[in-house]
Amino acid sequence: MCGIAGYIGPKNAVDVVFDQLKRLEYRGYDSAGIAYLQGDHIEVTKRAGKLSELGKALFETPKIAQLAIAHSRWATHGGPTNENAHPHYDQFERVAIIHNGIIENYLELKQELVAKGHKFKSQTDTEVAAHVIGEEYANGVPLEEAARKASKRLRGAFSLVLMSHTEPDKIVCVRNASPLVLGLGNGENMLASDIPALLPYTREVFIMDENTIGVLTKDSVHVYDSDGRSIPIKPMHIEWDVASAERGGFEHFMLKEIYEQPQVMRQVTAGRVDDSGVVRLEGVFNENVWTEIDRVNIIACGTAYHAGLMGKHFFESTLRLPTDVYFSSEFRYGNPVLSPKSLAIFVSQSGETADTLAALRLCKERRIRTLGIVNVIGSSIARECDRTIFTQAGPEISVASTKAYTAQVMVFALLGLYIAQVQEVPGVRVEEWVSEIMRMDALAEECLTLETDIIKMAEEIKDMPLCFFLGRGADAFVAMEGALKLKEIAYIPTQEYPAGEMKHGPLALITDKVISIFGCTDSTVRDKVVSNMKEVQARAGKCLAITTSDDTLMEQAADWTIKIPKTKYDFLNALLAIVPLQLLSYHIARLNGCEIDQPRNLAKSVTVE
Ligand code: F6R
């Protein structure tokens, strides 16, 4: 996700914020820019591409300033171009702003502003926010007051950083949802989206709470709540070495990304559901196309394939829409029968997976409608699909995919609900689904609090020679993803099956050393899963159950129990179950001394067939 940096003080602010951006490079970005004070105006330099491009443009001649803000962008609204890169000016070029997150009501605000005569240079939601601030920044209103008023007009999950040439002694920042950290120095102050950017300059940091506003001068830092009341600042002293801090204090990117999932769940829904429970997926085929689709084929690899299985489960059980899921690597060779009214969905985090791209090209040759569910903007699959829904999960650095999976499954749910709306599928209560989906971020946070118990379990089972992952319904699909995580990072052999299949052969592998992990989050089949568990235990196997918080009996049945929060829908319960499974694999791998972020033999983006 985007990187934010800002500095005010005696050092050359241009050099400082450029260095801070470099320290945020690991987050991934596609363009970058800086705003700095020069006399009575704000100078902005921005470039698409790597930071080196910005560096070339910026340092052609030496620049000196005592205040600067900078941004590295991971495109969401509008492609990665110079124009769309941040900072953006307000309509009078008095204020420059940078922004993380998404302004959900930007279209409606833009319409209002255009009607008043505002002109926009970019396609971004950020420039709209800049103009809203510009409107509030009139008649001697201080910049922080303009920011506070403007924030009340903006909807979404965002952080903003602002500077003005009429108040050249301050940086103002607003934290709504995306993280903002203030760095406190001696005669200098700074801010960033992540701690690593600050560490070479200060170890005293203050992490801003949601819905607060910060005002930094070189000698002072003040933070206010959304009503303008002052909030006491208690700085934290950071001991981390710079390299580990680049992972935001987490030992590995994988753990960091597991922990980002609540935020990712918010990002996925941002701008796609409205307060009245209506799902809006603009730009994804006209409504009449959706009513024509008679069948869906989902095509993907690895984790994305597992997300596709969840998509099939949703489409068939909720929409009664026939759906098949194919491994991309097999799709072309099976000479698939494709109905001309069908839709082919390609799921990919990187958007560059060669097998998936080849399958996409085959569908295009056959004139089948294609839709991408992709994380990386500007990637080949995103470009070549007729339409694409972006998962908005931010850059995923760990080779083992975690947050991208969650985002893909969430997108399938949103897409399914959108189809239900358009096709008017009887019996699907879209509003109720939406209200449960909007709780998922908080429920995923609760799942993360299970980590201490999970570490204890990991210590007990880390030496198992084989691990079964079992479940029924959606739990069976999540079991496949749980198994992939364990084998790819902890190198422990796994067997993954629908629980009912065990007695048809796999049960022969059970010994007293083998652990079986059962997904039991679907109360309608829980009794049957418990029977399968008993069959394993009768052969001396040990069982770990993942069940929902309302289940009072599982502790008696299983050897270990993990309880996750319960939603109204089995599909969403099963999705939440992936969080403890990811944590369990992570801790087993860590305890066994495995290389977690770059597991042996694997790469992040698989561009060969
Ligand atoms: C596993 C993993 C891989 C990818 C697969 C597809 O943790 O990351 O299985 O899911 O290589 O990659 P994308 O989604 O980039 O097409």
Image (spheres, rainbow, N blue to C red):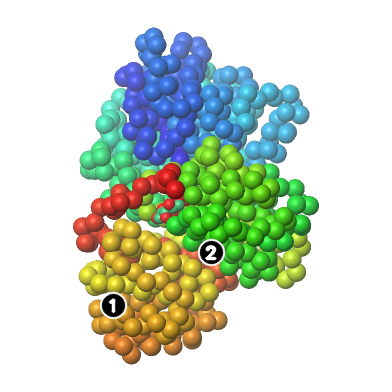
- Amino acid at pointer 1: Val
* Among the two numbered marks 2 and 1 on one chain, the one whose residue lies closer to the N terminus: 2
**What is the x, y in percent for residue 105?**
65, 42
Q: Is residue 236 left or right of residue 412?
A: left
**Residue at screen point 59% across, 64% down:** 324
* Name of the residue lying farthest toward the bottom: 538
Residue 97 appears in the picture as rendered: no
Q: Is residue 386 left or right of residue 219?
A: right
* Name of the residue lying farthest toward the right: 288
- Amino acid at pointer 2: Leu
Q: Is residue 345 left or right of residue 453?
A: right
**What is the x, y in percent for residue 456?**
26, 69
- Label 2, residues with CA under 10 Å away: few <14, some 14-19, many ≥20: many
**What is the x, y in percent for residue 22?**
35, 30
Q: Circle 1 is placed at which residue position?
A: 514
Tell me the distance, in whole angstroms, between the alpha carbons under discs 2 and 1: 26 Å
Say which of 476 and 225 sits in front. 476
**Image quadrant where residue 227 sits:** top right
Please tell me whether residue 306 is drawn above or below residue 38 in the rendered image: below
Please tell me whether residue 26 is drawn above or below residue 373 in the rendered image: above
Q: Circle 2 is placed at which residue position?
A: 309
**Residue at screen point 50% across, 11% down:** 40
- Label 1, residues with CA under 10 Å away: few <14, some 14-19, many ≥20: many
